[in-house]
Image (cartoon, rainbow, N blue to C red):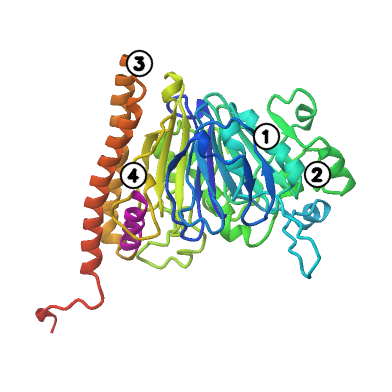
Amino acid sequence: MPCTTLLVGRKASNDNSTMIARTDDGHFDTKKLIVVEPKDQKRKYKSVLSHVEIELPAEPMRYTSCPSVDTKDGIWAATGINEANVGMTATETITSNPRVLAADPLVELRKAKKRGEKEIPGGIGEEDILVLVLPYIRTAREGVLRLAELLEKYGTYESNGIAFNDENEIWWMETIGGHHWMAKRVPDDRVVIMPNQFGMDSFDLDDAFGKKESHMCSADLREFIAENSLDCNQGGRFDPRNVFGSHSDQDHIYNTPRAWYMGRFIAPRAYKWDGADADFTPESDDIPWSFVPERKLAAEDVKYLLSSNYVGTPYNPYLNQDTGVRGKYRSIGINRTGVTAICQIRNGVPDAIKGIEWVCFASTTFDAALPVYTNVRRMPAYLSNVTLDVSSENFYWSSAMIGALADHSYNSCIQHVQRYQSKVMTEGRRIIREYDRRMIGSGDFSLAEKANEELCAMAKEQTTYTLGKVLYEASVTMKNGYNRADN
């Protein structure tokens, strides 16, 4: 899916946590947040889209999941944290090029075309990957290794990027063609930005084929590159983006502008981002994959970046005046997002409460991010009891309604939206801090479920209040409004 990913190393975050975050930008995909218990995890998995069947290990762990409510196309679990405090987001759809795809074709479903002909299943994809991996891994590195084994055995029918984090490390993995892959440990002091393109712009092959401290890849990747004349680099530097990625005109409208906007927020003084002599423009192909942030990032910053529409630039689609380029580039925060989640693994707290998942449903531009504890046996109904029927009784549909109403009355609604977003994050942090103290002091970590209920009660109150505010503002600006004084 056309998503945006942000990865924050522990020394780049304000509280020494690791954070992996992604907007899951589907087609208005209705989402919920649930907990999957080991007894509910299938032992034999079959993909709806590709028909591939995979035997799963016998002892899965409990994990959170953000599946689609409508399962006609599969689970699409999107993001989660397991009971070993490993987070995962899957997947960021990335780009490739014909040279790679011809050398290692994607593994697509081949249906039988006539009687007696056998169907040939496809590989795995975004529909499947989180369910196949997250319940079985105890570190971020193990996530790479398990997914690599699946890719090499079954292949994939699409090009994807996948992130894993534990309390110490973040690993970013990108697929290459149908069966190949490479993965890189995110440096602790860096923030990675990923806007639907092949991302990595450097890679140490010697480490990948040696100690594997910070780099891993397919065992035959060197031969694969050489035999298929894939290396387009000059000067001896190995830039994977030039080898496996794309440089299309469409990238300059859809992808690179998002990297430009996030980069100028993260490192505003290290580079010149505007003007004729800018180091990088919205259409630059060489915007770095990672930056050392000029100030450490908190979850609020991650949410802000993944909500952005080029505010402060002439490209902002909500500007009152036409700048000639207003709305030219694909925004980061868009209308058809199903869920945005920040998987945060904290340091300095007991294992039972290390995992916090910040969840934001529908368009991030207008909706709030709510933190919840993940090492629990169930999620509150406000997050988990979502159906395809529109209802203000759950966070998903209430969020979707706020966004749809506020967008059409942006100038009058945005003040209500910003107050709402700040209130939910402020109160969310306050409740987390309170329950951290209570659980650490008492040793009763079952209080996490009570905390989540309190968090959801707060979110429901604030969301309902804001929905009323934006409904009023949108009603005032309806085209069929009329007053007797109008004539």
Crowdedness of circle 1 by 10 Å Cα count: few (<14), some, many (20+)? some
Could one spot residue 192 in this view of the protein?
yes
1 and 3 marks in contact (CB < 8 Å) = no
Residue 299, image x and y in percent? 41, 36
Residue 471, image x and y in percent? 24, 62
Which disc, if any, is residue 381? 4
Which disc, if any, is residue 468? none
Residue at 45%, 47% (x, y): give it: 340
1 and 4 marks in contact (CB < 8 Å) = no
Q: Say whether residue 291 is left or right of residue 361.
A: right
Which comes before the other along the chain, label 1 or label 2?
A: 1
Q: Which residue is mark 2?
A: 234
Which comes before the other along the chain, label 1 or label 4?
A: 1
Q: Is residue 434 magenta?
A: no
Crowdedness of circle 3 by 10 Å Cα count: few (<14), some, many (20+)? few
Residue at 28%, 43% (x, y): give it: 459
Residues 98 and 256: in front is: 98
Could one spot residue 182 in this view of the protein?
no
Q: Say whether residue 429 is left or right of residue 281.
A: left
Q: Which residue is mark 3?
A: 443
Can you say whether 390 is above or below 259 in the image?
below
As measured in the structure, the alpha-carbon distance from the residue carrying label 3 to the one carrying label 4 is 26 Å
Residues 184 and 137: in front is: 137
Judged from this view, the residue extending furthest toward the right is 227
Identify the image quadrant of the N terminus. Answer: bottom right
3 and 4 marks in contact (CB < 8 Å) = no
Which comes before the other along the chain, label 1 or label 3?
A: 1
Span highlighted in magenta in the image: 395-407
Which comes before the other along the chain, label 3 or label 4?
A: 4
Residue 311, image x and y in percent? 41, 53
**Which three-letter amino acid code belongs to the residue tagged 3?**
Gly
